Amino acid sequence: MTDARDAPDDLAFFHERYGKTRSRAARRVELDAFGHDVGVNGYTTVVQATDLCRQLEIGPGQRLLDLGAGRGWPGLHIAAELGCRLLCTDLPSEALAAAKDRGAEWVLGGDGRALPLRTGSCDAIVHADVFC
Ligand SMILES: C[S@@+](CC[C@H](N)C(=O)[O-])C[C@H]1O[C@@H](n2cnc3c(N)ncnc32)[C@H](O)[C@@H]1O
């Protein structure tokens, strides 16, 4: 069976999606549905992201890795709530540029299955709606 993540057009889909400027209508829908304009590209709600804050045992100054962060959701929310430092990783550079614009301290392009990070370089990992 083929892993859906191996399909070459899968990444092309995300490149295309993140490469487009978000329309006013899309922002408005997100604002109405989520209560925030966070640049979400999945199904994780603000309530769920806030719940993750309670489950992650990290605090100010510690490092959170958001794997497949897209435009920085939910890592940016968690980092703001907990005061932790944030590394966003994903494959499309367009997504990481948006995450950086939104305030991610570090961004790293690469496949989440083989990131060039040393063991112990992050204190917690979160991934929302990512299957890799
Ligand atoms: C449904 S989006 C979710 C994005 C973001 N977490 C959110 O909730 O808005 C899935 C993300 O996973 C990323 N992704 C898929 N396969 C990946 C892989 N092998 N390594 C890193 N990121 C991957 C995609 O580029 C995409 O940004």
Image (cartoon, rainbow, N blue to C red):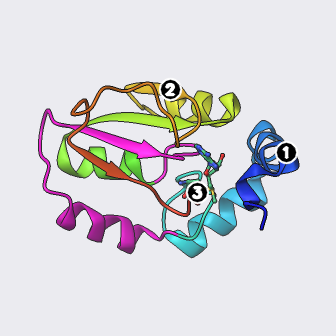
Q: Secondary structure at mark 2?
A: strand
Q: Quadrant of residue 29?
A: bottom right
Q: Is residue 12 above or below residue 34?
A: above
Alpha carbon separation for disc pair 2 and 3: 19 Å
Q: Residue at x 53, y 43 (%)?
A: 113
* Relative horizontal placement of residue 113, taking residue 122 as reference (left or right): right
Which quadrant is home to the N terminus?
Answer: bottom right
Task: State yes or no: Cβ of the residue under disc 3 lies below 8 Å from any atom of ligand 1.
Answer: yes
Task: State yes or no: Cβ of the residue under disc 1 lies below 8 Å from any atom of ligand 1.
Answer: no
Q: Residue at x 21, y 33 (%)?
A: 120
Q: Tell whether label 1 touches label 3 (CB within 8 Å).
A: no
**Residue 92 picture location, percent across and down:** 69, 35
Residue on which disc 2 sits: 108
**Residue 76 picture location, percent across and down:** 39, 45
Q: Secondary structure at mark 1?
A: helix
Residue on which disc 1 sits: 8
Q: Is residue 91 above or below residue 97?
A: below
Residue on which disc 3 sits: 40
Upstream in the sequence, badge 2 or badge 3?
A: 3
Discs 1/2, front: 1
Q: Secondary structure at mark 3?
A: loop
The boundaries of the magenta stretch are: 44-73
* Relative horizontal placement of residue 74, taking residue 19 as reference (left or right): left
